[in-house]
Amino acid sequence: MLAKTFGSAVYGVDATMITIEVTVGQGLGFFMVGLADSAVKESQQRVEASLKYFNYKMPRQKVVVNLAPADIRKEGSAYDLPIALCILDSSEQLEAEKDLKDYVIMGELSLDGILRPIKGVLPIAIQARKQGFKGFILPAENAHEAAIVNNIDIIPVETLEDAIAFFRGKSTIEPLVVDTRDLFFTSQNDYAADFKHVQGQENIKRALEIAAAGGHNAIMIGPPGSGKTMLAKRIPGILPPLSLPEALETTKIHSVAGKLGKRATLVSRRPFRSPHHSISDAALVGGGSFPQPGEISLAHNGVLFLDELPEFKRSVLEVMRQPLEERKVSISRARMAVEFPANFMLIASMNPCPCGYYNHPDKECVCGPGVVQKYLNKISGPLLDRIDLHVEVTPVSFDQIASTRKSESSEQIRERVIKARDRQTDRFKDQKEIYSNAMMPPELVKEICVIGDPGKALLRTAMDRLGLSARAYDRILKVSRTIADLADSEDIKVEHLAEAIQYRSLDRENWAG
């Protein structure tokens, strides 16, 4: 007898439906076909142990399990539950009232029949709804994540016996319903780190506000203990709230990577990722024989913070160059090519020299001649070319630390950032895939960032006297456009250009002596 149901395989951030067919007939042996990896083939032992635990029999005949389409590689242990149910159905032990073919079924079995959570539930639920399935049966710990998707029954089960009872009609499992919008809007502004807790550093807060308003990448250069990491951690709190489509896309990536916690639902706050400098190329951009999203994709619609930038391996930093431009990363393997979104804000920090005290107002730098420049040269010019703001961070004085004066909160800064982003949304409404000033290509910069003769004179003088490179020209114009947006100005004025020019520290000749 042939039994059939459906599962799913996730490639990139999208799911593909997999047909699971089982026949039990004359002969001996257990055979699994359909390009299954070792984890899928090992399901035989888990399924057999689970069936015996609940007093069912593993057929002592020829059992053939087919995973179709056969040319797509299947990976992982999430096919245990549908295979077990199909074996019971094919061997006439299930006696089901409900049709297995109406449901997508996924779940890993433990040896005592308890279902373990799986990865990639959200894209599977989206695809199941798109293809018109009645419901999605899955481990209870993943149910809240799948319930983000409406118009499909999400059936949470704790054990194999629960699933069997559901199909026999002996138990009624109510579909899980989650008020996605309510959960989303009540928690999207819940950030623990707030700028109101930061004393001093007003110029750095201003620079980060500009970066958030225009979606600009930024690097902070300063001595140890000057507050670079503390400031960076507060940036998500001043970015505009995630929209529902952004939140859904972000949740899909975290679901595929298995980064959502137990009973997690929609990601409602902008991600903040801070990988250690020992990270590998594949861990940063994504990869593996079966490609998984890396840190730059997990930071999609949020912030990627690289602390102590020169300590990262050169090869790791260089692989970011293309994703920074294209806002996505393509990973090709012999059998497949997948694409992960990677639209993130890069915030980096670094010491000005190996000892950390070059240009320090109180402490003397002990680095030898040429050491500072050699340290800065660890960061390539093409990567610096993609960072719009270079900000020098100075230590906070005792008077500022001890001050009882209240600092501006993240909420107040965010209101200004949202207004600036609204202006950009209106400006780029006819442009495809351009949402912020930082995303403008050179041809659009010339069209939108028009400056008058006084502004041109200032920019010419700055480039001559400070030795600014040609690559700084477009960056200064983009940043000045953002500053004008924050000031609610239609035109880029001289004062906007002047402020933008000061954020190009590393482009100045002889900056490192």
Image: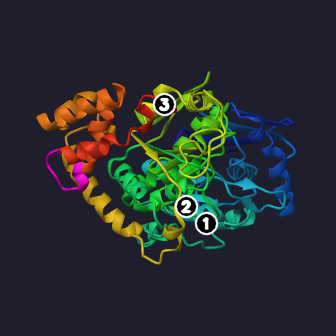
Q: Secondary structure at mark 1?
A: loop
Type of amino acid under label 3: Leu
Q: Residue at x 45, y 47 (%)?
A: 131
* 474 over 298 or under it: above or below: above
The residue that disc 2 covers is: 145
Whether 491 is among the magenta residues is yes
Pick whichever, 62 or 313, lies toward us: 313
Q: Where residue 25 appears, x then y in whole percent? A: 78, 39
Magenta residues, start to end: 484-493
State which quadrant residue 437 falls in: top left
Q: Sequence order check: which comes first, mark 3 or mark 1? A: 1
In the drawing, does residue 291 fall left or right of residue 391?
right
Q: Assess disc 2: are there few (<14), some (14-19) or many (≥20) residues with their C-alpha within 10 Å of its C-alpha.
A: many
Q: Which residue is mark 1?
A: 263
> Which numbered disc flags the more N-terminal residue, 1 or 2?
2
At label 2, which amino acid type do we have? Glu
Q: Is residue 379 left or right of residue 481?
A: right
Q: Which quadrant holds residue 349?
A: top right
Based on the picture, tell me whether residue 222 belongs to the magenta stretch. no
User: Which residue bears the numbered disc 3?
Assistant: 383
Q: Residue at x 65, y 38 (%)?
A: 354
Q: Amino acid at mark 1?
A: Arg
